Image (cartoon, helix red, strand yellow):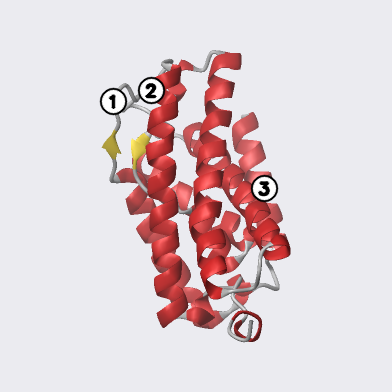
């Protein structure tokens, strides 16, 4: 029950915080629907790594999470609001388990989104304002760091609370698999962000043309 209450509270807070943001823009409505459906599909189309737990959605499997990319596109609060709907469609729609849905939402959506948001703010504050830096920082680096840090946190929780359903108990296997997963997440996020910045820059809320094109 704690998982469900926590997930619901964060979702409602996200709705409140983003009430005047990009989620209220009718021109982006089709984009939101597309993101929800594509991510829900991506969460369930996976190639499992060795020693992973195929019976649980929280495991080291070769697939795309997308939390960092949504933060880069729409901002943190809008991203976690959309990710809640993704979890309902992609997890609850398959398993019918609200606890599993809430746990997935909190551990592999909210936490990486929060870490990615922190990385993006650090990139914006510390690094030069160039388009390449934006793609590298908000696309690749934010996705890699958020995925890797979240994986370490999940493994730590598994060890501390003896949550064996989270995946493998092999530290080396977990670490190597996490590196592969993080590189894949970073590469896909960076590539997709670069494509969107070229063809649909108006969809990327972290992009300000006057700041990055005149630098």
Quadrant in the picture for the C terminus: bottom right
**151, above or below 202, in the image:** above
- Tell me the residue at 58%/40% (across/down): 106
| Crowding at mark 2 (Cα within 10 Å: few <14, some 14-19, many 20+) | some
Residue 44 vs 48, above or below: the answer is below
Q: Which residue is mark 1?
A: 50
Crowding at label 1, few (<14), some or many (≥20) Cα neighbours within 10 Å?
Answer: few
- Where residue 105 sits: x, y (%)? 53, 42
Seen from this angle, which residue lies furthest top?
162
Frontmost residue, 210 versus 18? 210
Give the structural element (helix, strand or loop) at label 3.
helix
Q: Quadrant of the N terminus?
A: top right
- Badge 3 crowding class, 10 Å Cα cut-off, few under 14, some 14 to 19, many 20 or more, is some
- Residue 60, label in figure: none
Q: Are marks 2 and 3 in contact (CB under 8 Å)?
A: no
Residue 158, position as x, y percentages in the image: 53, 20
Quadrant of residue 36 within the rendered picture: bottom left
Instruction: Assess whether mark 1 and mark 2 are in contact (beta carbons under 8 angstroms).
Output: yes
Please identify the quarter of the rendering in which residue 33 is found: bottom left
Q: Residue at x 40, y 65 (%)?
A: 192
64 relative to 118 in the view: left or right: left
Residue holding disc 2: 173
Label 2 or label 3, whichever comes before in sequence order: 3
Q: Given this view, does label 1 or label 3 mark the residue nearer the observer?
A: 1
Q: Residue at x 56, y 61 (%)?
A: 138
Q: CA distance from mark 1 to mark 3?
A: 33 Å
Closer to the camera in the image, 178 or 39:
178
Q: Position of residue 127 (x, y in %)?
A: 66, 64
Q: Is residue 175 visible?
A: yes
């Amino acid at each position: 029950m704690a998982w469900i209450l926590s997930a619901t509270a964060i979702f409602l807070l996200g709705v409140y915080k983003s009430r005047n943001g990009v989620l209220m823009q009718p021109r982006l409505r089709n984009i939101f629907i597309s993101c929800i459906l594509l991510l829900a599909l991506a969460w369930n189309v996976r190639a499992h790594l060795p020693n992973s737990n195929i019976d649980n959605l929280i495991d080291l499997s070769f697939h795309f999470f997308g939390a960092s990319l949504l933060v880069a596109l729409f901002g943190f609060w809008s991203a976690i609001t959309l990710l809640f709907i993704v979890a309902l469609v992609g997890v609850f729609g398959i398993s019918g388990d609200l606890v599993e849905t809430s746990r997935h939402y909190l551990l592999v959506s909210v936490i990486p989104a929060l870490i990615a948001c922190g990385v993006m703010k650090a990139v914006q504050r510390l690094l030069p304002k160039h388009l390449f830096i934006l793609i590298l920082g908000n696309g690749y680096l934010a996705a890699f760091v958020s995925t890797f840090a979240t994986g370490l946190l999940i493994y730590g929780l598994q060890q501390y609370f003896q949550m064996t359903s989270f995946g493998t108990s092999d530290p080396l296997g977990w670490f190597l698999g996490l590196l592969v997963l993080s590189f894949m997440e970073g590469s896909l996020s960076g590539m997709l962000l670069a494509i969107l910045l070229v063809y649909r820059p108006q969809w990327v809320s972290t992009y300000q043309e006057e700041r990055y094109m005149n630098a």
